[in-house]
Image (cartoon, rainbow, N blue to C red):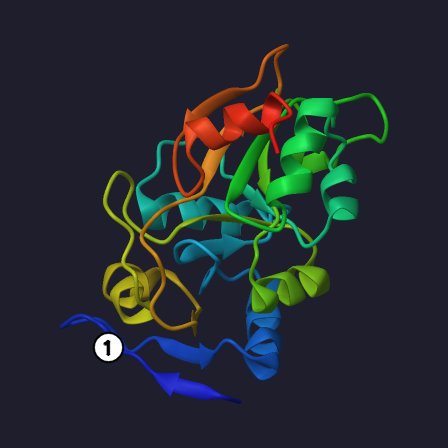
């Protein structure tokens, strides 16, 4: 099934690796359906992924990262239709930014509108951070599975390894599958909060603050 061999740390069991191809996507979807947590390549850094409606799998992501429970996990989607199905409020600023950088390294933190109703796993939330990645393998997987919670494949606050082997050495015991997409960048997406009256850059990453400001001002 397109499997490759990784390099786990001493004392850890070998992780199951697959390539970022159609067979790898099928294997990843199966692990996710069974409630597993996987590592996937994105267009920025390696990510730790789970189904958002599986409470046990989401809890496993928090444990693997050591992420504080009060910090919500970002979501990756395959399309605008999947994003809108989350019930987010998609205003003109969000539409402008999405038109320029989706698919791409832009995460938008949305508030919620009234229609359509949000999924039950988003009940009680004031906002959700969402991105459509510029990565063919990952978007194909997301088309199969629906949106996934995906956060950087590292320990909270640490740099994200640029290789699948590096992710295995950190998280190998915590994940059911690692998709090897080769060496990736070490720069995260840029996070812009579009929930309020004025968009706010909350994390500068692959897209600069200046580029965001120019886009919002209508600059070419």
**Where is residue 121 drawn, in percent x and y?**
66, 37
Quadrant, the C terminus: top right
Q: Is residue 4 visible?
A: yes
Residue reaching furthest to the bottom: 1
**Where is residue 196 drawn, in percent x and y?**
61, 13
Residue occupying image coordinates x 35% and y 32%? 68
Residue occupying image coordinates x 46% and y 24%? 201
**Where is residue 1 drawn, in percent x and y?**
53, 89
The relative height of residue 149 versus residue 72 in the rendered view (above or below) is: below
Q: Residue 174 lies in what quarter of the image?
A: bottom left
Residue occupying image coordinates x 48% and y 57%? 43
Left or right, 201 with reference to 84: left
Residue reaching furthest to the front: 220
Residue reaching furthest to the top: 197
The residue that mark 1 highlights is 7
Q: Nearer the viewer, residue 37 or 146?
A: 146
Secondary structure, mark 1, is loop
Tell me the crowding category of disc 1: few under 14, some 14 to 19, or many 20 or more residues within 10 angstroms, Cα based.
some
Left or right, 184 with reference to 19: left
Q: Is residue 70 visible?
A: no
The relative height of residue 52 versus residue 14 in the rendered view (above or below) is: above
Residue occupying image coordinates x 52% and y 29%? 212
The relative height of residue 110 versus residue 142 in the rendered view (above or below) is: above
**Where is residue 104 drawn, in percent x and y?**
56, 49
Numbered-mark total: 1
């Amino acid at each position: 099934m397109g499997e490759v061999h990784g390099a786990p740390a001493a004392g850890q069991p070998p992780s199951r690796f697959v390539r970022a191809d159609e067979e790898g996507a099928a294997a990843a979807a199966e692990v996710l359906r069974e409630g597993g947590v996987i590592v996937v390549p994105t267009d920025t850094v390696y990510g730790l992924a789970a189904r958002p409606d599986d409470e046990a799998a989401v809890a496993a992501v928090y444990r693997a990262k050591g992420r504080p429970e009060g910090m919500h996990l970002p979501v990756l989607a395959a399309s605008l239709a999947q994003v809108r199905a989350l019930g987010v409020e998609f205003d003109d600023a969000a539409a402008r930014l999405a038109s320029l950088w989706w698919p791409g390294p832009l995460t938008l933190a949305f508030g919620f509108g009234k229609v359509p109703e949000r999924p039950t796993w988003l009940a009680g939330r004031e906002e959700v951070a969402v991105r459509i990645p510029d990565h063919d393998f990952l978007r194909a997987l997301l088309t199969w599975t629906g949106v996934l919670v995906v956060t950087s494949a590292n320990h909270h606050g640490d740099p994200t390894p640029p290789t699948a082997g590096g992710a295995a050495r950190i998280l190998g015991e915590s994940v059911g599958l690692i998709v090897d997409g080769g060496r990736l960048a070490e720069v995260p997406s840029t996070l812009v909060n579009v929930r309020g009256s004025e968009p706010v850059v909350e994390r500068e990453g692959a897209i600069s603050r200046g580029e965001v400001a120019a886009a919002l001002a209508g600059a070419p």
